[in-house]
Image: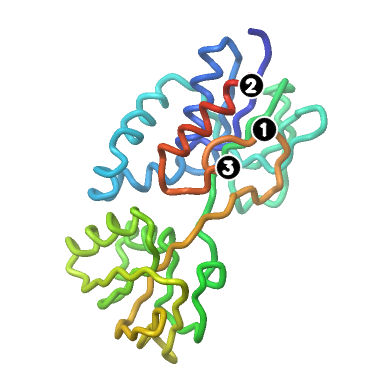
Amino acid sequence: MDGRIAVVGGGYSGVRMASILSEKGYDVVVFEGRDGGEITVFNSLPELREHYIDYVEEYFELLKTVRIEKGVVRKVTRENLVLVSGCYTDRDSRDCSNYGRFEQVVVCTGCYDSNPISANIYGMRPAGIFSLENAIRLILKGYRIGREVLIFGDDAILEVFNSMLGRMKYSTHVVSGEYAVVRGRERVEEVVVDGERFRCDTVVYFKKRECFNPFNLKGVKAGNINAKTYDYKEVKKDVLKVSEDF
């Protein structure tokens, strides 16, 4: 198969897609602005690594087989010329002329956790309210997010997160419900979930995810930008489904 393909995003979805397309005979270049996607975060925390071990191991094996170029893709022209900058803080883009034009662009930029309103969290907005994604990243950096943590939601990933906090000596409570009301001034003091009160100083919530495409890049979308989930079976399924059209 002839043709050059640019894959935007070097996380699990991007690397998996690049591997499949390379096997089909395409010349594939992966562009990644950071150090891989959230799968690298999962790999750094024992409970999450164990939960995602099949995908973590697959990811690092696939990294050996694909070409990755560092750079943030900020624009894809109508002629499929990719414009990049060195990092997210760069204001100017430069023409990626050394890579030439591509036959197609596949966008694998992933997703992010929705905001508190989308997660049905109402009331006050004191310190101590975190999306699951932000809580995980803060813990990875060595921060303590609180002492008494209410985990709000009903996804399976929250039980894994709860196990991680237990090992780290947090006091936790996992609660599912339609909505939560936060009370507290400078810091969370209480959360009411469907009428039931819980004393805590921290809320970690997860209800749903949104697609992450900050520069509104045009191209074929694949992976977690479509699946929008912590269930990587669904992420892999989407990559395989999209790749069938190539």
Q: How far apart are marks 3 and 2 (CA)?
A: 15 Å
x then y, percent, for residue 182: 44, 83
Find disc 3 in the rendering and name its residue.
Answer: 226
Assess disc 2: are there few (<14), some (14-19) or many (≥20) residues with their C-alpha within 10 Å of its C-alpha. few
Find disc 1 in the rendering and name its residue.
Answer: 220
Residue at the bottom extreme, as displayed = 185
Q: Distance between the residues labelled 2 and 1?
A: 10 Å
Pointers 3 and 1 in contact (C-beta within 8 Å): no
Pointers 2 and 1 in contact (C-beta within 8 Å): yes
**Disc 3, SS:** helix
Whether residue 80 sits left or right of residue 172 in the image: it is right
- Sequence-first disc among 2 and 1: 1
In this orientation, which residue lies closer to the viewer: 29 or 46? 46
Disc number lying in front (3 or 1): 3
Q: Which quarter of the figure is the N terminus placed in?
A: top right
Query: What residue lies at 41% left-to-right and 44% top-to-bottom?
Result: 231
Reply above or below: 188 against 136: below
Assess disc 1: are there few (<14), some (14-19) or many (≥20) residues with their C-alpha within 10 Å of its C-alpha. few
Reply above or below: 62 against 85: above
Query: What residue lies at 82% left-to-right and 32% top-to-bottom?
Result: 78
Whether residue 166 sits left or right of residue 127 in the image: it is left
**Disc 1, SS:** strand
Name the mark on residue 245: 2
Query: What residue lies at 43% left-to-right and 69% top-to-bottom?
Result: 130
Q: Residue 2: name its quadrant.
A: top right
- Sequence-first disc among 3 and 2: 3
x then y, percent, for residue 170: 21, 70
Residue type of the residue flagged with mark 2: Asp
Assess disc 3: are there few (<14), some (14-19) or many (≥20) residues with their C-alpha within 10 Å of its C-alpha. some
